[in-house]
Amino acid sequence: MSKVTFKITLTSDPRLPYKVLSVPESTPFTAVLKFAAEEFKVPSATSAIITNDGIGINPAQTAGDFICSYGMCF
Amino acid sequence: DSEIATVLRVKGLLEFRCQLDSTDEQLVRNVISRTFETLRSQVKSESCVLAVSDSPVIIWPNKDAYATPEEITPSTLCEDMHQWIQADEQESSGKKSSKKKSKKSSMSVINLCLMTEVTKPGPLSAPILTKTVLKSHFVNVTLPLDCVVCTGRSNTIKDACEQLIEALTHQLCEMEKVTLQNMKGMTLLVPEPVHFLLPEPKGLVTVVYPVGVPDSQLVAQRKELHEQFELPDDRPYFRRANAYHFPNEPYKDGYLRNPHLALTHPTLDNGKVYLVQGIYSYHHYMQDRVDDNGWGCAYRSLQTICSWFQQQGYVERPVPTHKEIQQALVDVGDKQASFVGSRQWIGSIEVQAVLGHLLGLTSKILFVSQGAELASKGRELANHFLTEGTPVMIGGGVLAHTILGVAWSETTGQIRYLILDPHYTGAEDLQVITDKGWCGWKGPDFWDQTAYYNLCLPQRPKVI
């Protein structure tokens, strides 16, 4: 099972803290969001993840699918 | 100053009838071609008549443009025809705004009906009937002719007749081509003309499509058309949904289209106006017998956005209902099943998720932590309307709205937002909607200065 890695920045904090998360590529994105929200100690129900250029994410995608559309795949 | 063009639109039904004594493909094709040739002669014959709709005017185009009433001569100017036409003052679909609101339209349309004189005075002769018993196929199709011709200021009736007859003959040739191309054994598809308004200077163009063949199977034809008319290959111009809607035809679904066109746009120092491109429908509270007063504003804004994608030909799916929107959010795992049928609010992120799941669209999300910062998004919004031109949904401060455009000055930073308000609960009355600002230009103080706002900017798919 390969993993995919994300750098997630919390934009509601002016210091823009970020975390680097690795998840199995089959993880549905809703789980990635929950995981990231827990790490940042913010409520996941009122949080969303978007790419650097503002593209919103389909929560039904898996982490692996998402990386291949918007990130770097080798 | 560009002259106001008069567009002549002639519609009519021609009976395509032929007898096929053999099923040999080449023979069948020959018979079809001959039948089309007969129809072309019919159109060029003296028994062809053009009746101007809503008027007493009748013209014989192939008899040197002889017309009745007798005040009309072949050298009468086309634009003078308007005097004879009795426009219908009451429109059944919603109250139209008074004369002062009607924008200077660059096109006036005169509708004509194609008719054939069935009897004419001539030498009397006894009819002869013969009866033959023979098995054959009989093809009987009604062809919907629909041609448009643009005339200039100085064009006379005679000129117009020549143009119209030429257009009709040309359309019959196009129909013959399409019929033969789409022949499958003994099945013929009806050829149907569709009009498209291309960017200036190309204007109105008519394409004949086979009825029943979906857009997805006509990609090759559209590619050819894009090349022929030198159009960009990343946005649709020739899908059936892109068909031009003539100004005098009401929309059957009753929704208002582009109410913002009735407004006067603000002028800012060194400022420019950036508007939504294309056509959208105004969706708001209480429509479709759904009482969503107080909770449905974001849903309505989402419906307006969906209507844009449908009318620009990107999706065929009709505008989703509140329940369908809620079900979509459950289906993608964003909400629990109990969400369907509830009156819960949604925001920009949910709008983006629904656009993705139901319409296959990508959207960009913009956000500001304080409403006061929205003024700084002028350049981005201007750029969005220039490149994508889609309506924007904005949510925050307990309200949702649709942004249809911005007036923005690069030098002074002044900004105004063109807002379509989904909180309107009244009827589809353009006058009220524009007078009371339900569709109107707002300043930066329209936003709650301390509230957090998210914006959903839908992106056009790069397809034709």
Image (cartoon, coloured by chain):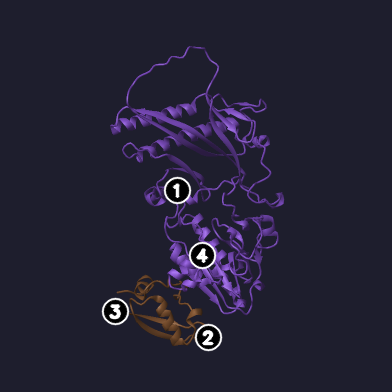
Q: Position of residue B8 (x, y in %)?
A: 57, 38
* Residue B363 visible in the shown view: no
Task: Report if the CB atoms under discs 3 and 2 are less than 8 Å apart.
Answer: no
- Provide the secondary structure element on which disc 1 rests: loop
Q: Colour of chain A?
A: brown
Q: Answer left or right for B88 relative to B176.
A: right
Q: Which mark is residue A2?
A: 3
Alpha-carbon neighbours of circle 2 within 10 Å: few (<14), some, or many (≥20)?
A: few
- Provide the secondary structure element on which disc 2 rests: loop
Task: Report if the CB atoms under discs 1 and 2 are less than 8 Å apart.
Answer: no
Q: Position of residue B229 (x, y in %)?
A: 45, 48
Q: Which mark is residue A6?
A: none
A13 or B212, which lies in front? B212
Mark found first going from the N terminus, 4 or 1: 1
- Provide the secondary structure element on which disc 3 rests: loop
Q: Which residue is mark 2?
A: A14
Rendered residue at 52%/83% (across/down): A12
